[in-house]
Amino acid sequence: MARPVICIGTSHGPQLITEPRDWPARVIADKRNRHFHRGTEYDFDGLVALRAKDRDWAPQIAFEMWQRRHGLCQEAIGALADRFRAARPDVAVIFGNDQSEIFTDANIPAFAVYSGETIANIPKSTEQRADLPPGVAEAELGYCPPVKAVYPCQPELARHLITSLIADEFDVAQMNSLPTGPRGHNGVPHAFGFVYRKIMRDDVIPHVPLIVNNYYEPNKPTVKRCAAFGRAVARALRSAPGESRVALIASGGLTHFAIDEELDRTVLDAFAAGDLERVERIPEAMFRSPGTGEIKNWIPLAAAALELGMKMTLIDYVPCYRSEAGTGTAMAFAYWAA
């Protein structure tokens, strides 16, 4: 059987990659967009009015605070990368999501397993970068190297996962190659690119990408279904042939773009306690924001770790606010080990 040796959860937002002086560019997008906070939709000004009573926002969005929080995040990313290397995995299974990078409205599976021999990380063209939201193009080097990179995958393990998941009544999509996304790009989604560049430090081992649709209605899996998916992945790994050392990794989250520290703490505390039922009781409306929905990449990881008898250690939780509306991304970094 394959032997899981470590599980790693990491955020992947642009604020982790760009310098604090560049964070105001993301506020431009915040002011254009509508935001979900605890299940209700607001425009930016409505969110400012709602959250004015929460706290004094000036210290939260001071440049010195941005610098301190950015530094904490870099330390945590480095600690996760060190843990990954020390675990000496032979293969990785990565839970991530797509944001119209490879899928179009023609086909958005709830769960997909990539089973190709290799996967490409391809830099975006100048035109494609210009089409990105404010403050995102500046982060591209954190997700993709300057020139095209091709990484090894593990098709044998992918096929075993597909077979086992189908037997476990998960109708997963099989992907042997990456489709060309709506903007003409055919590289890997940034959720995976962050793992390659920052956790694996560009020394990418054979792996299997698992894509969870936590962005697009109407077929977003529920929290309960995501937890069941993680447990099924753990069972599949137990029955996988060979003696490979396996790392499981989740990339995304936590709450954004309206940060909700209470929700984040509820989720992280439940993961640490091994109490997934506590997370399953959270109303689906709380995950209505596409960004916050990325917590559903962490949920299968936490469920798999619990199934495998692993315990979580939280390295850090850093709410990276960037505006008086409480917008930004709450960053979290954790690992599970036996």
Image (spheres, rainbow, N blue to C red):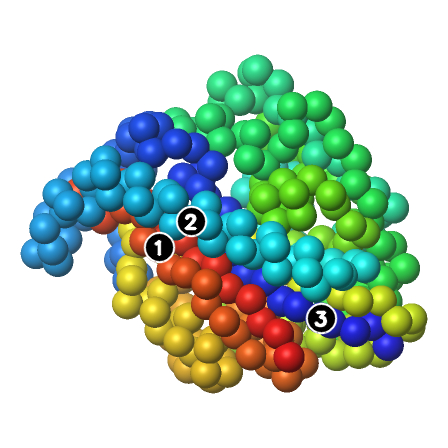
Can residue 62 be seen from the camera position used here? yes
Up/down of 36 relative to 273, above or below: above
Which is nearer the N-term, disc 3 or disc 2?
3
Q: Cα distance, mark 1 to mark 3?
A: 26 Å
- 139 sits left or right of 178 in the view: left
Q: Position of residue 27 (x, y in %)?
A: 28, 34
Which is nearer the N-term, disc 1 or disc 3?
3
Q: The residue under label 1 is which amino acid type?
A: Val
- 217 sits left or right of 320 in the view: right
Up/down of 337 relative to 285, above or below: below
Q: Position of residue 72 (x, y in %)?
A: 38, 50
Residue at the spot of label 1: 318
For image coordinates 32% across by 28% down, the residue present is: 21
Residue at the spot of label 2: 73
Q: The residue under label 3 is which amino acid type?
A: Val
For image coordinates 86% across by 77% down, the residue present is: 1
For image coordinates 75% across by 36% down, the residue present is: 120
For image coordinates 76% across by 65% down, the residue present is: 246
Can residue 228 be seen from the camera position used here? no
Q: Position of residue 334 (x, y in %)?
A: 50, 64
Residue at the spot of label 3: 5
Up/down of 115 relative to 38, above or below: above
Q: The residue under label 2 is which amino acid type?
A: Cys
Q: Cα distance, mark 2 to mark 1?
A: 7 Å
Camera-nearest residue between 317 and 289 = 317
Callouts 2 and 1 close, C-beta under 8 Å: yes
* Identity of the residue furthest to the top in this view: 126
Mark 3 nearby-residue class (10 Å; few <14, some 14–19, many ≥20): many
Q: Secondary structure at mark 1?
A: strand
Q: Position of residue 90 (x, y in %)?
A: 81, 59
